[in-house]
Image: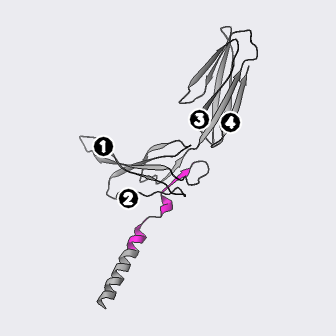
């Protein structure tokens, strides 16, 4: 009888502790465009320690894990100790998301990459011209091509599922001719081809 009482006590403890665990689907890294889980994403946990009236807090790396096939993740580190935690996540062909409050963002969206290939062609090959293109890109910024003959292209990566305005200025024989611009939509994980012909 005593063994049965211990067994019942053990079962009830297991039941309560399993009921206490949060649903794994509450801890996910998802695609911002499709809302589908991202598998094999890297998720990092950071804890703010110390800090007070005089000194600032220190951010300490605590754990790194990867998501499963459904984009779910779990940390082994105890995040219920009253500290402030932040997470960051990244995956191939996605933009990283960093420094997110863990208490508020257990489900984190990553923007997919979108790609553009821009062809630039100057039709007239006698006059000297310059084209300056504002790509609004962190990596490329403002691009310039010049000469009597321009026939080239460039590629870049943007946030997929979003539009961006490309603006360009054309100068011929040192006189600015015109300003132009177009909104370009970048499909997630796909390449948009765009031409500037002048």
Q: Which is closer to the viewer, label 2 or label 1? A: 2
Q: CA distance from mark 4 to mark 1?
A: 43 Å
Which quadrant is home to the N terminus?
A: bottom left
The residue indicated by pointer 2 is: 76
Label 4 secondary element: strand
User: Of the numbered discs in the image, which one, if any, rests on residue 157?
Assistant: 3
Residue 38 position in % (x across, y down): 55, 52
Q: Residues within 10 Å of mark 1 (few under 14, many from 20)?
A: few
**For residue 22: magenta?**
yes
| Left or right of 6 on screen, residue 129 | right
| Left or right of 99 on screen, residue 55 | left
Residue 131 position in % (x across, y down): 65, 18
Q: Nearer the viewer, residue 95 or 102?
A: 95
Q: At 64% across and 25% down in the image, what residue appears?
A: 167
Among all residues in the image, which is located at the extreme bottom?
Answer: 1
Q: CA distance from mark 1 to mark 3?
A: 34 Å
User: Of the numbered discs in the image, which one, if any, rests on residue 121?
Assistant: none
- Which of the two labelled residues, at mark 2 and mark 1, occupies the earlier sequence position? 1
Which residues are drawn in magenta?
Answer: 16-34
The residue indicated by pointer 1 is: 58
């Amino acid at each position: 009888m005593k063994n049965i009482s211990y067994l019942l006590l053990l079962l009830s403890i297991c039941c309560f502790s399993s009921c206490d665990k949060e649903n794994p689907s509450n801890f996910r890294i998802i695609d911002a465009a499709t809302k589908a889980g991202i598998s094999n994403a890297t998720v990092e946990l950071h804890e703010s320690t110390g800090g007070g009236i005089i000194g600032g807090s220190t951010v300490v790396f605590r754990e790194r894990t990867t998501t499963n096939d459904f984009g779910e993740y779990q940390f082994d580190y105890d995040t219920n100790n009253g500290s402030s935690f932040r997470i960051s996540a990244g995956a191939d062909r996605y933009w990283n998301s960093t420094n997110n409050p863990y208490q508020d963002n257990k489900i984190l969206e990553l923007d997919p990459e979108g790609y553009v290939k821009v062809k630039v062609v100057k039709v007239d090959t006698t006059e000297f011209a310059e084209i300056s293109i504002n790509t609004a890109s962190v990596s490329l910024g403002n691009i310039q091509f010049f000469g009597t003959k321009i026939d080239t292209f460039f590629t870049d990566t943007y946030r997929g599922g979003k539009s961006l305005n490309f603006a360009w200025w054309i100068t011929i024989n040192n006189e600015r001719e015109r300003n132009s611009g177009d909104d370009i939509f970048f499909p997630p994980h796909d390449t948009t081809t765009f031409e500037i012909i002048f």
